[in-house]
Amino acid sequence: MDATSSALKWHTVAEAAQLTGTSKRTLWRKVGTGELPSRLEGGRRLVGLAPSDMSATSTGLASAAVAAAGAFRAADGMMEAVRAVEASAALAVAQAQSRADEATGRIRQVEASLARWRVAAVIVPVGVAVALLAWRPPASARADGIEPGQVAQAAGVEVEVEVERAVPPVPPMPAPWHPPMALPEPIR
């Protein structure tokens, strides 16, 4: 066989023995007698094999090995894809947790605001009622039921009391005030 033939594929001695289905010793003997072409490359002996030199079984084994290597590369690619998906999912979870924390903070702010409105809804009407009570003048009736003019007459002093001037007029009661959030929307 010609060592310069372009149809030759160059393999190490171990690979060539496996591809031809022979032992390494038989392969070395064939190289020594010149039946198989060989060359030295980088300190290693390479054996040139033509497709006809390879056995059908070894070719099947070689194709199975190539297929297995491809399967391993595909599995490695799948593992990288799984890692990328895991990283993406971890990032999405972290972002969702951050948004949940922000929403929790906003909920607490709204709850605090509602608590202040509830307090205002109680305090303001009570304050208005106290102010209205404080604004009214005290009642002129005494505990014994005697009017002030009668007391003066009983003492022998004549006093003319203008009742309308002594007691200021009571203004009409204003409509009860409610905070804006406390009133329901009118139905239309």
Image (cartoon, helix red, strand yellow):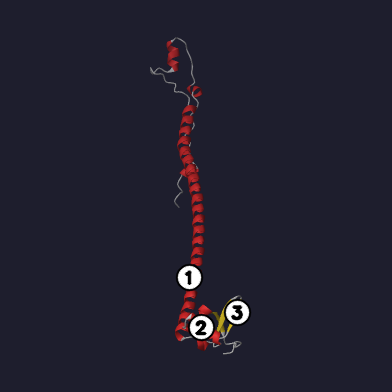
Query: Gap between marks 1 and 3, in whole Å?
Result: 36 Å
84 up-or-down from 22: above or below = above
Q: Which of marks 1 and 3 is nearer the N terminus?
A: 3
Pick the quarter of the image with the N terminus. Answer: bottom right
User: Is 126 positioned to the left or the right of 38 in the image?
Assistant: left
64 up-or-down from 115: above or below = below
- Which residue is more in the foreground, 102 or 22? 22
Which percent across, then down, holds residue 97? 49, 53
Residue contact at pointers 2 and 1, CB within 8 angstroms: no
Identity of the residue furthest to the bottom in this view: 1
Numbered disc 2: secondary structure: helix
The mark closer to the camera, 2 or 1, is: 2
Point out which mark residue 75 bears: 1
Identity of the residue furthest to the top in this view: 156
Query: What residue is rendered at 47% in x and 86% in y?
Result: 55
Residue contact at pointers 1 and 3, CB within 8 angstroms: no
Mark 1 burial class by Cα count in 10 Å: few <14, some 14-19, many 20+: few
Q: Which of marks 2 and 1 is nearer the N terminus?
A: 2
Which percent across, then down, holds residue 186? 45, 49
Point out which mark residue 127 bears: none
Residue where numbered disc 3 is placed: 40
Query: Gap between marks 3 and 2, in whole Å?
Result: 15 Å
Identity of the residue furthest to the left in this view: 144
- The image quarter containing residue 126 is top left
Residue where numbered disc 2 is placed: 27
Numbered disc 1: secondary structure: helix
Which percent across, then down, holds residue 156? 45, 9
Query: Gap between marks 2 and 1, in whole Å?
Result: 35 Å
Which percent across, then down, holds residue 169? 49, 28
Numbered disc 3: secondary structure: strand
